[in-house]
Image (spheres, rainbow, N blue to C red):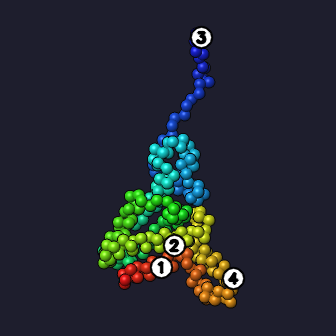
C-alpha cells in the first residue's frame, strides 16, 4: 500500500469558519428582505443566503417559514407602546386610539408587514401581550368579559385591516410617499368618477380621498369604540 500523498501547504484547501449570527440578525435580515421585495421575498433560504450561511443554520432559530413570519410580526408588535393602554390618566378610548396610531406608524416603517399580519400567525408572546393589554384597557372602560373579548377582536380587525388597505395602494416598499401626496393622488383619481353614474361617490370623493390617512384611521376607531361603550 502506497503512502498517502502529501499536499503542499500552499495547496491545502482551508475550510472557512462557520459564520456566527443571532436570532435578532435573522429577524433583521427578514425585515430587510421584506422591505426590498415584499412578503413573497421572505423565506428561510433567502435569509440564509443574505447571511451567508446554510439554510439549516437558520433553522436553529426558526422552525419554518411560518415561524420566521411570526418572528417578524413579533418584532413589530413588540415595539408597540403598551404602557398607554394601562395609564389611568388616559381615558380608555383615547388610550386605544393613541396605541393604534403608534402601531400604524411602526407598521408603515415596514409596510409589507401589513400583508404578513393578514396571513401569518399572530400568536407569539408579543401578540399575546398586545391582546392582554387591550383586554385590560377595555375592562377599564367597563365592558363585561364577553363584550371586551369581542371588542378586542373588532379593534384589531379594524386596525390591521385599515393599515393593510392603506399599504395595498402602494408598492409596499419603504419609505412610503408622504401621506399628503398619497391622498392627493387618490383625490385626482376620484375626480374622474362621473357624477351621473355614481352620484353619491362623486359627492363624497374629497372625504374618500382621505380614507388612507391618519385622520380617517382615528375617526373609524373612535366610532367603533364609541359604539362599543354605548351598546
Q: Secondary structure at mark 1?
A: helix
- Whether residues under marks 1 and 2 lie with C-beta atoms below 8 angstroms apart, the answer is yes
Which residue is disc 4 drawn over? 192
- Residue behind mark 1: 220
Task: Using the numbered discs, state the Cα–Cα distance from disc 4 to disc 3 in whole angstroms.
Answer: 87 Å
The residue sitting at 63% across, 89% down in the picture is 199
Q: Position of residue 3 (x, y in %)?
A: 58, 12
Relative horizontal placement of residue 38, taking residue 146 as reference (left or right): right
Q: Are marks 2 and 3 in contact (CB under 8 Å)?
A: no
Tell me the crowding category of disc 2: few under 14, some 14 to 19, or many 20 or more residues within 10 angstroms, Cα based. many
Instruction: Kindly check if marks 3 and 1 are in contact, taking CB atoms under 8 A apart as contact.
Output: no
User: Disc 1, disc 4: CB below 8 Å?
Assistant: no
Q: Give me the residue at 39% from left, 74% from top.
A: 151
The alpha-carbon separation of the residues under discs 3 and 1 comes to: 84 Å
Mark closest to the chain's N terminus, 4 or 3: 3
Q: Pointer 2: what residue? A: 162
First reached walking from the N terminus: tag 2 or tag 3:
3
In the picture, measured across the screen, residue 148 lies left or right of residue 21, that is: left
Measured as percent of width and height from the top left, residue 216 is found at 51, 79
The image quarter in which residue 88 lies: bottom left
Residue that mark 3 sits on = 2
Instruction: Using the numbered discs, state the Cα–Cα distance from disc 2 to disc 3 in whole angstroms.
Output: 75 Å
Whole-angstrom CA distance, mark 4 to mark 2, is 24 Å
- Label whose residue precedes the other's in the sequence (3 or 1): 3
Amino acid at each position: 500500500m502506497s503512502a498517502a500523498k502529501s499536499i503542499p501547504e500552499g495547496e491545502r484547501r482551508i475550510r472557512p469558519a462557520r459564520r456566527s449570527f443571532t436570532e435578532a440578525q435573522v429577524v433583521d435580515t427578514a425585515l430587510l428582505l421584506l422591505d426590498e421585495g415584499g412578503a413573497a421575498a421572505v423565506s428561510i433560504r433567502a435569509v440564509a443566503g443574505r447571511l451567508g450561511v446554510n439554510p439549516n443554520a437558520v433553522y436553529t432559530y426558526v422552525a419554518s417559514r411560518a415561524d420566521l413570519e411570526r418572528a417578524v410580526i413579533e418584532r413589530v408588535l413588540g415595539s408597540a407602546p403598551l404602557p398607554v393602554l394601562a395609564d389611568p390618566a388616559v381615558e380608555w378610548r383615547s388610550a386605544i386610539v393613541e396605541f393604534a396610531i403608534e402601531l400604524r406608524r411602526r407598521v408603515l416603517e415596514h409596510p409589507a408587514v401589513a400583508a404578513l399580519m393578514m396571513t401569518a400567525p399572530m400568536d407569539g408572546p408579543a401578540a399575546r401581550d398586545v391582546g392582554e393589554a387591550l383586554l385590560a384597557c377595555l375592562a377599564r372602560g367597563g365592558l363585561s368579559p364577553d363584550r371586551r373579548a369581542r371588542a378586542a377582536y373588532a379593534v384589531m380587525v379594524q386596525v390591521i385591516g385599515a393599515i393593510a388597505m392603506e399599504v395595498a395602494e402602494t408598492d409596499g416598499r419603504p419609505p412610503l410617499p408622504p401621506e399628503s401626496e398619497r391622498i392627493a393622488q387618490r383625490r385626482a383619481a376620484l375626480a374622474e368618477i362621473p357624477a351621473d353614474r355614481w352620484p353619491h361617490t362623486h359627492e363624497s370623493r374629497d372625504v374618500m380621498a382621505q380614507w388612507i390617512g391618519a385622520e380617517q384611521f382615528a375617526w373609524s376607531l373612535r366610532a367603533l369604540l364609541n359604539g362599543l361603550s354605548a351598546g
